[in-house]
């Protein structure tokens, strides 16, 4: 059940003020999302509790399986996708439209995100997520603790894939509960399906890059960022929100502004992730530092390092094609920074945020939404996790 903040006509957010460069990033983000996140999480909690109970009734062993999927969705996170979708919707409908009818659609994006994370962790062989063991690791540990037959790691990976699959189906089911006209929901589904296709395409290119680094480039790495992250983190959620409002005209000025803003902020978000993946504090990011160096993933950061390197640095960086041992990660992180690649990526992030804000300035939209999206462009790309 939605809380008092969303009962009635409009979500009550903290007072919106012009973005101040001196504002702490987390404060800005919290000011625009606090009540929305609470409403989304209550929607998720009610839905997931019912779904877990339904599966547990089939066989007792399914309770822990379904509960793992439940916990993946609710175990923290920034809730960026529902947030961008909300402001995409709010930018069209203004502040008086009732929120409860569209909450299932906003919450469904968070379940979709859990699907992507679980599968991504299996593909990347990641050990932790949000400071906790990844699903495949925790499932393998449960296998060992129960002294079951077979390979625990193989079981963990298979079970994690199924947890991700379950989240994908749950996302579809919750989306179907959105209380908008059938024609509007069909437009929303088209946007949702395109978002999923682009995400899978980006994930495949991401996997391919690790095995074909010699044929990669900065442009190709940016293409991966665009499809793997920008599309389903910012651009498509914004367009998803505008479709919820019944604004699915492809050439509408506001949709064009959302597209430009979404691509810019989404790419900047992934570029920030590239930096955090090498230089982030594991206590804050919840993941080990240097995973991209360990695997040799050809991110924009690493492609730029190769491009900017001196001949001696380039010779050293060639070792990254196959990844590097964990005890050499710090040395290679210093080498990448020494090429000037980190400074270049930070400039790319800044340029994209500037372009995103400019895209909104010319759009005809709800002023509160414009202010919120301006703040979110900064908050989502200047972060420590």
Image (cartoon, rainbow, N blue to C red):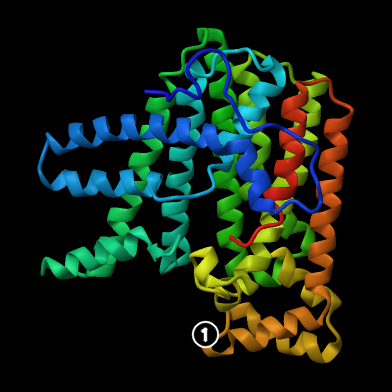
Q: Residue at x 70, y 46 (%)?
A: 266
Q: Residue at x 41, y 60 (%)?
A: 122
Using the image as rendered, state which of residue 254 and residue 26 is in the foreground.
26
Q: Position of residue 108 (x, y in %)?
A: 46, 32
Which residue sits furthest front? 15
- Say above or below: 43 vs 94: below
Left or right of 173 in this view: 110: right
Badge 1: few (under 14), some or many (20 or more) residues near its Cα, within 10 Å? few
Q: Position of residue 75 (x, y in %)?
A: 39, 50
Q: Quadrant of residue 2?
A: top left
Left or right of 116 in this view: 376: right
Mark 1 — residue? 326
Using the image as rendered, state which of residue 19 and residue 15 is in the foreground.
15
- Asked whether residue 150 appears in the rendered view, the answer is no
- Say above or below: 120 vs 32: below
- Asked whether residue 45 appears in the rendered view, the answer is yes
Q: Quadrant of residue 81?
A: top right
Q: Quadrant of the N terminus?
A: top left
- Say above or below: 180 vs 175: above
Q: Quadrant of the C terminus?
A: bottom right
Q: Quadrant of residue 314?
A: bottom right
Q: Position of residue 289 (x, y in %)?
A: 56, 74
């Amino acid at each position: 059940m939605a809380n008092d903040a969303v009962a009635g006509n409009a979500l009550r957010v903290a007072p919106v003020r012009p973005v101040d460069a001196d504002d702490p990033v987390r404060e800005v983000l919290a000011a625009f999302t606090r009540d929305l996140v609470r409403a989304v999480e209550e929607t998720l909690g009610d839905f997931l509790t019912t779904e877990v109970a339904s599966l547990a009734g089939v066989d007792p062993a399914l309770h822990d399986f379904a509960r793992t999927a439940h916990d993946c969705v609710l175990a923290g996170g920034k809730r960026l996708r529902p947030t961008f979708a909300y402001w995409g919707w709010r930018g069209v409908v203004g502040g008086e439209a009732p929120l409860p009818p569209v909450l299932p659609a906003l919450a469904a994006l968070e379940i979709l995100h859990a699907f992507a994370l679980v599968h991504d962790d299996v593909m990347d062989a990641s050990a932790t997520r949000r400071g906790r063991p990844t699903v495949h690791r925790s499932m393998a540990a449960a296998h060992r603790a129960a002294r079951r037959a077979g390979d625990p790691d193989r079981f963990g990976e298979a079970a994690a894939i199924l947890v991700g699959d379950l989240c994908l189906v749950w996302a579809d089911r919750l989306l179907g509960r959105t209380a908008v006209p059938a024609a509007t929901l069909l437009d929303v589904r088209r946007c949702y399906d395109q978002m999923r296709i682009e995400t899978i395409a980006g994930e495949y290119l991401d996997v391919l890059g690790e095995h074909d680094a010699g044929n990669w480039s900065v442009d190709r790495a940016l293409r991966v960022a665009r499809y793997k992250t920008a599309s389903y983190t910012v651009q498509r959620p914004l367009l998803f929100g505008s479709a919820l409002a019944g604004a699915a005209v492809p050439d509408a000025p506001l949709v064009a502004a959302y597209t430009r803003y979404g691509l810019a902020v989404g790419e900047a978000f992934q570029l920030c992730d590239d930096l955090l993946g090498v230089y982030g504090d594991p206590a804050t990011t919840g993941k080990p530092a240097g995973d991209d160096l360990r695997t040799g993933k050809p991110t924009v950061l690493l492609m730029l390092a190769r491009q900017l390197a001196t001949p001696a640095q380039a010779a050293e960086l060639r070792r990254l094609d196959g990844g590097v041992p964990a005890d050499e990660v710090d040395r290679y992180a210093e080498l990448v920074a020494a090429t000037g690649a980190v400074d270049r990526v930070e400039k790319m992030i800044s340029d994209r945020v500037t372009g995103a804000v400019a895209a909104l300035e010319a759009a005809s939209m709800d002023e509160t939404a414009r202010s919120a999206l301006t703040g979110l462009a900064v908050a989502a790309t200047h972060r420590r996790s």
